[in-house]
Image (cartoon, helix red, strand yellow):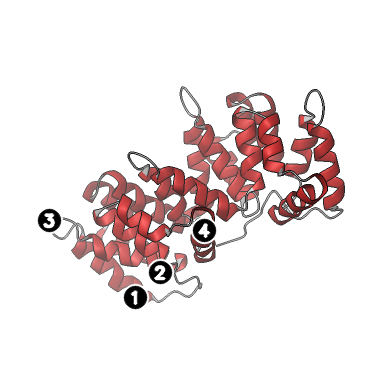
Amino acid sequence: MGNFHPTIRRHHNFDAERDAKKLHKACKGMGTDEKTIIEILSNRSSDQRQEVKVKFKSMYGKDLEDVLKSDLSGNFEKTALALLDRPCEFDARELRKAMKGLGTNESLLIQILCTRANQQIEAIKEAYKRLFDRDLESEVKSDTSGSLKSILVALLQAKRDEGLEINEALAGQDAKDFYEAGEGRWGTEELTFSTVLANRNYMQLRATFKAYEVLHGKDIEDIIDSETSGDLKEAYLTLVQCARDCQGYFAKKLNKAMKGAGTDEDMLIRILVTRAEIDLQTIKEKYQQMYNKSLADAIKSDTSGDFCKLLLALLH
């Protein structure tokens, strides 16, 4: 969708063996050389970090993750380990965390599954199976219910049309169906919303939202706001906002993570790590436009130490 710009690209002068040696030296003996760890992890693509992991193990007989775990701590450790996962593995671990034990973190399920493209969802399902020997769809089904379950399961099919064509007649029909399912009757008929939001391409969805406004004089987000509640409302709004402006959605989430008392470090880590190679540069620009403050400055005032340095390094 649109022109995305990442902050991390493949490192040109890459040498997995040299990186492995540097990381080994950074973690050996007394004290840790955090600067080297930050420099390497934030300047290599995910594929290159995988190569470094493999090289490290073959040279030193140890997993790089284990070495970093024993040398680092807190949010700095969390971010470094997140960077050693492939993005799909990191997402799979986050989803597992959201469903493990008592209670489910629906918000986390929504944040991941409602914002990923088909290919990402397929990769996450595969990683989930490989890492936990469990089926992601079955787990989502058993951990959620009702209309939220329907929309998440629909998204897990990874069948969204990812083209750019707009069918105006279909947009008009979908807008009409939205009205009949929502405002036009008591009790929202969620299935209509779920089917359209999970399967149409983003350009088509924008045309539908526009058609809705023309036909009924109201913004679709306001309708969702008044007709649904709780987790389902959050899922629908996430899908609508991503269709309209995905980078704006993430800029809002980052702002929310740092607003008021306390910081949601997990959210900062999740967004910066998973978007760095996709559209983090564009998210940075959106953040500046929306809040009149640079994302780097916001992170500086909300985090500290090596954790702060690593996040800033991801922003480049």
> In x, y percent, where is residue 295?
61, 36
For this orientation, the residue located farthest to the front is 61
Q: CA distance from mark 2 to mark 1?
A: 10 Å
What residue sits right under mark 1 in the picture? 170
The earlier-in-sequence mark between 3 and 1 is: 1
What residue sits right under mark 4 in the picture? 124
- Callouts 4 and 3 close, C-beta under 8 Å: no
Secondary structure under tag 1 reads: helix
Q: Is residue 309 left or right of residue 193?
A: right
Q: Give the mark toward the camera: 3 or 1.
A: 3
Q: CA distance from mark 4 to mark 2?
A: 21 Å
Which residue is at 62% across, 55% downward? Answer: 278
Q: Give the mark toward the camera: 4 or 3.
A: 4
Q: Nearer the viewer, residue 92 or 275?
A: 92
- For badge 1, the amino acid type reads Leu
**Residue 53 in view:** yes
Q: CA distance from mark 2 to mark 3?
A: 25 Å
Secondary structure under tag 3 reads: loop
- For badge 2, the amino acid type reads Arg
What residue sits right under mark 3 in the picture? 186
The crowding category of the residue bearing disc 2, from other C-alpha atoms within 10 Å (few below 14, some 14 to 19, many at least 20), is: many
